[in-house]
Image (cartoon, rainbow, N blue to C red):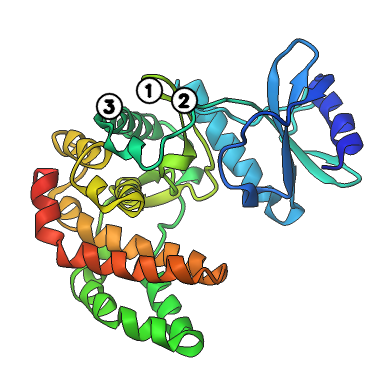
C-alpha cells in the first residue's frame, strides 16, 4: 500500500487516518483494485481505502453512482463516498483512490452456510427489493444485455485452439445449451442485475444481509441471472446445496411471486449451466487444474440431474 499517498488522499473526504486496521478481514475479490486496506478515522469510523487502476475509472464511477442510488433507496449497499468537491475518485501520484464505509460481515462456515434456509429468504428479499427500486433508476444503468451464448461460443473457439481436451469434454454440454438455451436467450425478459451474486459477495449479519459488495458486473441481464449464479455457486460448494438450504429456499420464495416469467423459470437449470462456463474460464486463466476438472464434472452433474433439481425447487 502506498500509505503516504493514501493518507494524503483521505484529506479529500475530510478523514484523518488514526490507524491502518490490518487485523480486519477484507471480503470480496482483491482483483477489483490495485490494493486496498481498512483505515480507522480519528472518530473511530472504519473505511475501505482502495487504489484504482485508471483504465477502469469510468466503470468505477458508474458503479459508485449506482450504489449510491441503491443505498438512498434503502438497500444494504455500502456506497463509495463523494468528496466535498463532488468527486468519486481522488487523483494522487500513485493513482486514483476510492473511499467506502467499511462493513464487517460475520465469517461464513463453508459450506455450512449453504444449508441455512434463512439466508435464502434474506437473499430473495434483497433481489425483490433490487428489482423494485431499479424501476426508478436512471436508464443509463440498463444498457445492452450481456449475451451469454455469444460469450460461450467465443470461449468454445478459444478452447478448441488452446485447450482442445477441455473443448472436447464440454462438447455434449455445449450442444445441449445450443439446443435449449441459446435460441431463447435474446427473447428472455431482462432487468437490472448485480451480475456476480454468490456467498462471498454478501456480507452477512446475524439474521440478514449487512451489505452486498462487488458490483462491477451490474447491468441489464435476464430476470433470473442473479438467482442462477447464486444457486450454481452454492452447488459448487457442495452438490447437496442444490437440494437443501439456501439455494432452493431462495428459488422457491421467488417462484411464488411475479419475479420472473414461466419461460425464464423453465430455463433456470440451463442458465446455471451456462454461467458455469464463465467460472471455468476463470479457472483456465489461473491454470487451476483441480478446479477445471471439478467445474467440468459439475456442469454435467447439472445437466444430468436437471429434472431432479426442478422438482426440488418446486416448479
**Mark 3 highlights which residue?**
118
User: In the rendered view, would you say 32 is above or below 39?
Assistant: below
Q: Are the residues tagged 2 and 3 within 8 Å (C-beta)?
A: no
Relative image position of residue 49 (x, y in whole percent): 73, 34
Q: What secondary structure is marked by label 2?
A: loop
**Residue found 72% across the figure and 57% down from its top:** 55
Which residue appears at 40% of the width and 50% of the height? 220
Dot 3 alpha-carbon crowd within 10 angstroms: few under 14, some 14 to 19, many 20 or more = some
Quarter assignment of residue 2: top right
Residue 208 badge: 1
Q: In this rendering, does residue 186 appear at all?
A: no
Task: Provide residue 194's location: percent of width, then percent of height.
Answer: 44, 43
Note whether 213 is above or below 191 in the view shown.
above
Q: Position of residue 282 (x, y in %)?
A: 50, 64
- Compared with residue 18, is residue 223 higher up or lower down, i.e. above or below? below
Labels 1 and 2 touching (C-beta < 8 A): yes
Is tag 2's residue or tag 3's residue first in the polypeptide sequence? 2
**185 to the left or right of 53:** left
Query: Which quadrant of the view contains residue 19?
Result: top right
Chain-order first, disc 1 or disc 3: 3
Q: Residue at x 52, y 37 (%)?
A: 213
Query: Are the residues tagged 1 and 3 within 8 Å (C-beta)?
Result: no
Residue 73 appears in the picture as rendered: yes
How crowded is the residue under tag 1: few (<14 C-alpha within 10 Å), some, or many (20+)? some
Q: Quadrant of the N terminus?
A: top right
Q: Which residue does the image show at 84% across and 19% down from the upper left? A: 16
Residue 76: image tag:
2
Amino acid at each position: 500500500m502506498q500509505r503516504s499517498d493514501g493518507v494524503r488522499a483521505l484529506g479529500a473526504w475530510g478523514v484523518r487516518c488514526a490507524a491502518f486496521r490490518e487485523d480486519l478481514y477484507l471480503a470480496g475479490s482483491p482483483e477489483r483494485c490495485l490494493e486496498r486496506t481498512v483505515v480507522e478515522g480519528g472518530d473511530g469510523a472504519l473505511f475501505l481505502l482502495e487504489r484504482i487502476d485508471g483504465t477502469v475509472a469510468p466503470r468505477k464511477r458508474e458503479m459508485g453512482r449506482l450504489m449510491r442510488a441503491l443505498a438512498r433507496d434503502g438497500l444494504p449497499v455500502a456506497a463509495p463516498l463523494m468528496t466535498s468537491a463532488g468527486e468519486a475518485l481522488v487523483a494522487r501520484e500513485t493513482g486514483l483512490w476510492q473511499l467506502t464505509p467499511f462493513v464487517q460481515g460475520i465469517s461464513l462456515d463453508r459450506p455450512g452456510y449453504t444449508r441455512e434456509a434463512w439466508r435464502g429468504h434474506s437473499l430473495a428479499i434483497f433481489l425483490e427489493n433490487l428489482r423494485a427500486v431499479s424501476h426508478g433508476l436512471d436508464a443509463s444503468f440498463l444498457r445492452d444485455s450481456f449475451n451469454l451464448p455469444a460469450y460461450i461460443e467465443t470461449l468454445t473457439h478459444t478452447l478448441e485452439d488452446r485447450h482442445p481436451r477441455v473443448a472436447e469434454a464440454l462438447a455434449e454440454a455445449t450442444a445441449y445449451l445450443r439446443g435449449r438455451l441459446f435460441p431463447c436467450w435474446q427473447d428472455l425478459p431482462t432487468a437490472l442485475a448485480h451480475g456476480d451474486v454468490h456467498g462471498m459477495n454478501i456480507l452477512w449479519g446475524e439474521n440478514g444481509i449487512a451489505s452486498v459488495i462487488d458490483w462491477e458486473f451490474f447491468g441489464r441481464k435476464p430476470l433470473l441471472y442473479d438467482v442462477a449464479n447464486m444457486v450454481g455457486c452454492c452447488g459448487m460448494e457442495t452438490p447437496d446445496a442444490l437440494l437443501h438450504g439456501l439455494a432452493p429456499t431462495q428459488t422457491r420464495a421467488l417462484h411464488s411471486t411475479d419475479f420472473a416469467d414461466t419461460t425464464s423459470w423453465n430455463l433456470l437449470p440451463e442458465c446455471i449451466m451456462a454461467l458455469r462456463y464463465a467460472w471455468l474460464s476463470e479457472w483456465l486463466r489461473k491454470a487451476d487444474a483441480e478446479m477445471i476438472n471439478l467445474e467440468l464434472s459439475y456442469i454435467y452433474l447439472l445437466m444430468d440431474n436437471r429434472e431432479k433439481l426442478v422438482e426440488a425447487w418446486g416448479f
